[in-house]
Image (tube, rainbow, N blue to C red):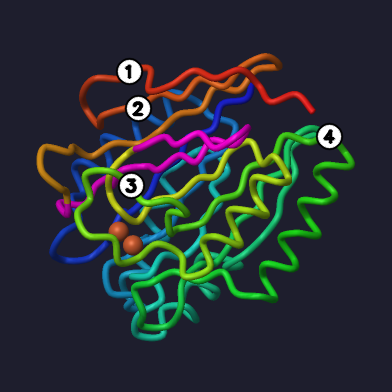
Amino acid sequence: MTVIAHISDLHVSTADFNEDIFMQAATEINRLQPDMIILTGDLTDHGYYNEFEQAKRYLEVFEAPLFAVPGNHDSRNLGYQSFEELIGEKSWKLTLGDEFTVIGLDSSSPDENKGHVGTPQHMWLEHQLDECVINEQFSIVALHHHVISIPQTGRERNVLSDAGDVLKTLTTHEVDLILSGHKHVPNIWRINDTLAVNAGSLCSSKLRGKNKNSYNVYNITDSEIEIFLNIVGGEKFLFGKFPRNTL
Ligand SMILES: [Fe+2]
Ligand SMILES: [Fe+2]
């Protein structure tokens, strides 16, 4: 079984970041011993260089390999440069054994809230996904902005501006999991054979209604994908269970 922890929207800052909740979440995730941690953006609140320095120190608490994409907040105030310097590449591809491919996309634009994948990155994505189909790999695509509107999040303003085209590429290539954050509300949408899963905010006080800080855990076996919603310091429950999409 492959175990992936999905965290999002830390918003490291002097205002809305809760260190105690972060440390609690990190302890829980380290105890789970996941194969990897995927962080879908908004590591910082303003994209300030010192927020990235702090975020980098916090992320070092995690024991599993962690891969992050930037969010809209990370691309403020030249944060897109700080992200590359202190965290890593903004878009990337990694493979886990012969069977898994994880692709990270940068959906952020400098000082803008709306998301955008853009033509060059989209073409690169298509090429990578063609290879996943040929090699029959389990494929995961991580990006900050949601590709489909999330319920209970009010007026839609920030879905990807090229969501239709991106969604078509992801679903026609039968991507297994699309992982996003941004709205701070956990959710699962199933479109054809693709699951689009949103994570809540791990440790920011920017929460909607009665939502609590949370993270998602994916247990992936040859036959199924179990998705757990873990409330930090609280209940852990099965959020969804789906048969594996066998090509
Ligand atoms: Fe956020
Ligand atoms: Fe965001």
Ligand 1's quadrant: bottom left
Q: Secondary structure at mark 4?
A: loop
Q: Amino acid at mark 1?
A: Phe
Q: Residues under labels 4 and 3: Cα distance? A: 30 Å
Q: Amino acid at mark 4?
A: Glu
Q: Amino acid at mark 2?
A: Leu
- Which comes sooner in the sequence, label 2 or label 1? 2
Residue located at (16% from left, 59% from top)? 16
Q: Residues under labels 2 and 3: Cα distance? A: 16 Å
Q: Mark 1 sits on what residue? A: 237
Residue located at (21% from left, 44% from top)? 152
Q: Do tag 2 and tag 1 residues touch (Cβ < 8 Å)?
A: yes
Residue 183 vs residue 66, the one in the foreground: 183
Residue 213 vs residue 62, the one in the foreground: 213
Nearest-to-viewer mark from 2 and 3:
3
Q: Mark 3 sits on what residue? A: 150
Q: Residues within 10 Å of mark 2 (few under 14, many from 20)?
A: many
- Which comes sooner in the sequence, label 4 or label 3? 4
Q: Mark 2 sits on what residue? A: 229
Q: Do tag 1 and tag 4 residues touch (Cβ < 8 Å)?
A: no
Left or right, 211 with reference to 60: left
Q: Mark 4 sits on what residue? A: 136
Residue located at (75% from left, 44% from top)? 95
